[in-house]
């Protein structure tokens, strides 16, 4: 039991009024921040967190994220984030998340894929060598589809966004959550008033730095299904996203 | 003693790696978020918080904020936010903040001025009628200069910013912290690498909504001293800010 508790870490939060979006719900960006935060807390718990890895110049890098929600916490709602490792190999670790309220109502789930890199050489570090990792895999169910590899996006009229001071994180790259924020800002308020985000996916491909002009591409695949791509000035993909909306009830 | 503890509320946070800025410190925007958050918690504590006021269609509105820092918490630093009411009258309440580490080292202070409005009529609600308010005033020292009334800014070449989905809060106005983020983004990364923000002030004057094109004005008053103004499409001021930089040691 004690072992199982360590495998699945549980963190509870309140949605403060100042944190809510125009629809009086948790913004997807805050949910993504909670995903990064709880992943970090849990990794710290068993000695493979940022503070340990940074001593060897290693760091966790988020490669893919998929979030699928049936509803979102509202203002003053308590929400619980459970996180656990589904599996790992030399290059990647798969970490899942479940979002629920204190009565056990499930808001949704998330899947994430991480690698560990050497910050100097930018090469991959072998995750299978991490102490305890073999004992920290849980078979808890995550009933949402796996992440997909998002295809290049066709769009003749990209919008240009110059990377700003507030976009940059401690590694001097654009913050993972800021890409999500900018992708969501490609849709008008009307979309969010009428529809909710049922599923959001992002593939992180290359890093962007301060001073870079990013190009935003968007393609509508079907009525409520869009892909997005952010490219750097050399035309290289920085990240690709996918968003599926559903009508609000 | 118990009474004094209630007058001064204390909240402790950790700066997570994912929250840090390019200078490996707490971003001023996160500090502002902590100010709003702890003010809300403290007001809730004695029954004048968002959840109570909203039942009467009333809400706290931040009018002015001044933050003055001698240093900033770094990654994994614990920081404590103390908050207390300095005074109040019919129209305004003055709430102060002290930021320190667990060893008692002071990072800085903040001053804020709040009003309460009726959301429908947009008129001011008499704060002196609030239960307990007279017992919740503390004479704890806040050794930074009071907020100033920031003058209109002279700038012939404003930059235009269309308000986006992620700027909007639960009241369907631009989020108070987002104005700060956009003001800070008016300075290049080089400024933040060489200098730190010693003092930041903001006066909130009019609300901006989704769909509005905001104009950003900036004026350099002396070497490290700038004022900024955001105006709406009708030329009316939305907010004005002041920033004083100091060389990093």
Image (spheres, coloured by chain):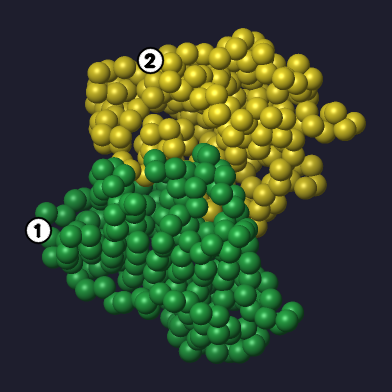
Chain colours: A yellow, B green
Q: In which image quadrant can residue A85 be found?
A: top right
* Residue under the point 64% across and 41% down: A71
Disc 1: host chain:
B
Label 1 sits on a secondary structure element that is: loop
Query: Residue B7 at x, y = what percent?
Result: 64, 79
Residue corresponding to mark 2: A152
**Frontmost residue, B137 versus B203:** B137
Number of numbered discs overlaid on the protein picture: 2
**Frontmost residue, B57 versus B190:** B190
**Frontmost residue, A145 versus B226:** B226
Q: CA distance from mark 1 to mark 2?
A: 42 Å
Rendered view: B72 above or below A134: below
* Side of B222 relative to B73 (left or right): left
* Side of A146 relative to B115 (left or right): right
Query: Residue A193 at x, y = what percent?
Result: 48, 47
Residue depth check, mark 1 versus mark 2: number of the one nearer the observer: 1
Residue B233, can we see it? no
Rendered view: A94 above or below B26: above
Residue B84, can we see it? yes
Q: Are marks 1 and 2 in contact (CB under 8 Å)?
A: no
Near mark 2 (Cα within 10 A), the count class, few <14, some 14-19 or many ≥20, is: some
Q: Residue furthest right?
A: A1
* Side of A66 relative to A120 (left or right): right
Near mark 1 (Cα within 10 A), the count class, few <14, some 14-19 or many ≥20, is: few
Residue corresponding to mark 1: B156
Query: Residue B189 at x, y = what percent?
Result: 29, 43
Rendered view: A123 above or below B81: above
Disc 2: host chain:
A
* Residue under the point 54% across and 29% down: A54
Query: Residue B80 at x, y = what percent?
Result: 59, 61
* Residue under the point 29% across and 62% down: B243
């Amino acid at each position: 039991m004690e072992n199982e508790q360590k495998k699945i870490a549980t963190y509870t939060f309140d949605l403060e009024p100042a944190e809510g979006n125009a629809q009086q719900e948790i913004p997807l960006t805050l949910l993504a921040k909670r995903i990064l935060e709880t992943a970090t807390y849990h990794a710290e718990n068993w000695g493979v967190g940022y503070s340990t890895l940074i001593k060897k110049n290693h760091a966790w890098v988020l490669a893919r994220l998929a979030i699928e929600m049936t509803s979102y916490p509202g203002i003053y709602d308590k929400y619980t984030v459970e996180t656990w490792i589904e599996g790992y190999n030399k290059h990647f670790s798969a970490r899942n998340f479940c979002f629920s309220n204190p009565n056990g109502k499930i808001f949704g789930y998330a899947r994430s894929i991480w690698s560990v890199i050497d910050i100097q050489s930018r090469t991959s570090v072998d995750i299978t060598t991490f102490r305890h990792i073999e004992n920290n895999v849980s078979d808890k169910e995550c009933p949402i589809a796996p992440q997909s590899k998002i295809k290049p996006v066709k769009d003749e009229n990209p919008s240009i966004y110059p990377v700003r001071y507030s976009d940059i994180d401690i590694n001097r790259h654009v913050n993972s959550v800021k890409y999500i924020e900018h992708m969501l800002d490609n849709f008008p308020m009307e979309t969010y008033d009428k529809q909710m985000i049922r599923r959001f996916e992002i593939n992180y491909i290359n890093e962007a730095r301060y001073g870079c002009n990013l190009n935003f591409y968007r393609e509508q695949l079907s009525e409520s299904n869009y892909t997005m791509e952010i490219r750097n000035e050399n035309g290289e993909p920085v990240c690709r996203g996918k968003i599926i909306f559903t009508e609000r009830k």
